[in-house]
Amino acid sequence: MNNRIAILGIIVEKPEAGNLVQELLHSCAAHIVGRMGIPYREKGVSIISVALDAPADVINTLAGRIGSLDGVSAKAIYAKN
């Protein structure tokens, strides 16, 4: 399978979902190039950006699993090549 470069944007609105998000990200640690987390305390959310180099089905599955968590939104953006 060909790997794709992607950014996975995650917004956590319920703090109790944070541990589940971390577990799912850890399950794909081999594909993570880098990540940045921003606790936006004034709005009560956490913003996470994850750079991935992985097959598209791995990225889509990860985005779907994270996005299906209660109080969490996730979206993947792919590089054109």
Image (tube, rainbow, N blue to C red):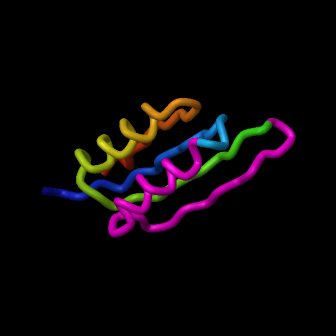
Instruction: Identify the residue at horizontal 65%, vertical 36% (top origin).
Output: 14
Q: Pick whichever, 12 or 70, lies toward us.
A: 70
Q: Tell me if residue 81 comes above or below residue 66 in the rendering.
A: below
Q: Is residue 35 left or right of residue 52?
A: right
User: Which quadrant holds residue 41?
Assistant: top right
Q: Is residue 28 left or right of residue 57?
A: right
> Which residue is the extreme one toward the right?
42
User: Which quadrant holds residue 4?
Assistant: bottom left
State the extent of the magenta-drawn residues as a range.
17-43
User: Is residue 30 within the magenta segment?
Assistant: yes
Give the quarter of the figure containing the N terminus: bottom left
Q: Is residue 62 left or right of residue 35?
A: left
Total numbered labels: 0
> Which residue is the extreme one toward the front?
16
Q: Pick whichever, 34 or 77, lies toward us.
A: 34
Instruction: Identify the residue at horizontal 38%, vertical 49% (top origin).
Output: 79
Q: Tell me if residue 7 comes above or below residue 73 in the rendering.
A: below
List x then y, in percent, for residue 31: 34, 64
List x then y, in percent, for residue 65: 37, 39
Instruction: Identify the residue at horizontal 32%, vertical 48% (top origin).
Output: 59
Q: Is residue 65 left or right of residue 10?
A: left
List x then y, in percent, for residue 15: 66, 43
Instruction: Identify the residue at horizontal 33%, vertical 69% (top origin).
Output: 30
User: Is residue 39 within the magenta segment?
Assistant: yes
